[in-house]
Image (cartoon, helix red, strand yellow):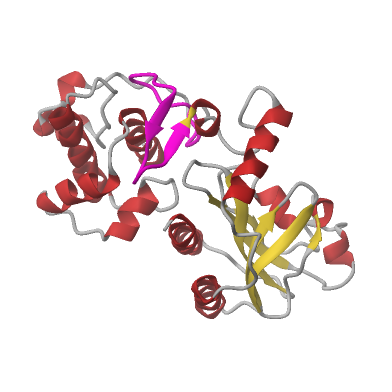
């Protein structure tokens, strides 16, 4: 059985390399009797949401059928097991995966046709540097950060204040998890700028004090269940002083080109347990933030 995240990575890389149009992929997936909705499929192909194995295989089939119809030479999306690959009709055409668990990254440059720019969604692009990841993804950290900040400013999100479309998501996040606060933070070169906040915790801060600035350094959910006893966070000023943060969970939000420009985060002044299912819900809500940013 192929690891679910490796299978997901394979699908993401295929879509990026071939420049597949997501609505076309989704329509093909629905024609194959896939029952995940469009938001879930978009989230899966952004590395934000994990699907059940049957739906992953149907989506791999949809991706490969789209490749076939376009005559693309990009590497195909992999299936969960050899039986599913054999039944698909595309098994013999898939490049063998020989990767350790640490050898793949959702932001790695796509394999396949090795184009320097591939369309993703409607009219956007993954160029070579962007596909290499947000902060720390390129060989030149200064150039990578410059490109990330450029993407942030071009998003237009810094130009206005609070917006209902984002406030609805932060309210949903706070109410679902029962935390005191939920917020969307944008990370500039030297600051954390709050785009949306519901609750008493969440404010503009210098970047070096921002937990969200740490969150965007990697494509993963950062969870601090009890900051008071966490060796990396117990001495942080936001923990030792006001506002007395105890619990934090945040997931990066990205531009359509893959730059991690901010986070959707949860905070509380009490420690909390955060399960794997909770992580998946937070990632899905972060996907909703991204879709609002992209449209």
- Queried whether the magenta region covers residue 106, the answer comes back as yes
Q: Position of residue 91 (x, y in %)?
A: 17, 25
Q: Main secondary structure of the magenta part?
A: loop
Q: Position of residue 227 (x, y in %)?
A: 76, 62
Q: Is residue 231 visible?
A: no
Q: Would residue 166 appear left or right of 199 to someone viewing this image?
A: left
Q: Residue at x 53, y 80 (%)?
A: 175
Which quarter of the figure has residue 65?
A: top left
- Queried whether the magenta region covers residue 29, the answer comes back as no
Q: Residue at x 21, y 45 (%)?
A: 24
Nearest the eye: 117 or 10: 117
Picture layout, residue 184 above or below residue 112 = below
Q: Position of residue 182 (x, y in %)?
A: 62, 72
Q: Position of residue 215 (x, y in %)?
A: 66, 50
Picture layout, residue 221 above or below residue 132 = below
Which quarter of the figure has residue 113?
A: top left
Q: Residue at x 37, y 42 (%)?
A: 123
Picture layout, residue 253 above or below residue 141 = below
Image quadrant in which the N terminus is located? top left
Image quadrant in which the C terminus is located? bottom left
- The boundaries of the magenta stretch are 104-126
Q: Would residue 115 appear left or right of 74 to someone viewing this image?
A: right
Q: Residue at x 72, y 64 (%)?
A: 226
Nearest the eye: 58 or 113: 113
């Amino acid at each position: 059985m192929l690891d679910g995240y490796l299978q997901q990575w394979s699908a993401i890389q295929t879509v990026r390399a071939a420049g597949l149009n997501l609505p076309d992929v989704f329509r093909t997936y629905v024609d194959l009797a896939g029952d995940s909705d469009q938001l879930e499929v978009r989230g899966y192909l952004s590395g934000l949401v994990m699907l059940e194995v049957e739906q992953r295989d149907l989506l791999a089939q949809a991706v490969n059928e789209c490749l076939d119809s376009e005559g693309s030479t990009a590497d195909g999306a992999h299936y969960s097991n050899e039986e599913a690959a054999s039944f698909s009709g595309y098994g013999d055409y898939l490049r063998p995966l020989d990767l350790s668990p640490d050898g793949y990254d959702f932001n790695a440059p796509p394999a396949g046709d090795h184009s320097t720019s591939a369309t993703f969604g409607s009219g956007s692009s993954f160029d070579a540097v962007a596909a290499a990841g947000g902060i720390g993804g390129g060989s030149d950290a200064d150039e990578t950060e410059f490109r990330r900040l450029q993407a942030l400013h071009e998003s237009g999100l810094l130009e206005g204040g609070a917006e209902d479309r984002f406030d609805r998501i932060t309210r949903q996040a706070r109410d679902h998890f029962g935390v005191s606060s939920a917020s969307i933070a944008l990370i500039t070169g030297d600051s954390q700028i709050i785009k949306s906040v519901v609750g008493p915790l969440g404010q503009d801060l210098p970047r070096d004090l921002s937990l969200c600035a740490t969150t965007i350094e990697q494509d993963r959910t950062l969870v601090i269940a009890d900051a008071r006893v966490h060796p990396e966070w117990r001495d942080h000023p936001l923990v030792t002083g006001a506002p007395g943060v105890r619990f934090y969970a945040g997931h990066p939000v990205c531009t359509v080109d893959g730059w991690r420009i901010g986070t959707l985060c949860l905070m509380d002044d009490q420690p909390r347990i955060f399960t794997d299912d909770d992580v998946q819900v937070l990632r899905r809500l972060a996907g909703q933030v991204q879709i609002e940013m992209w449209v």
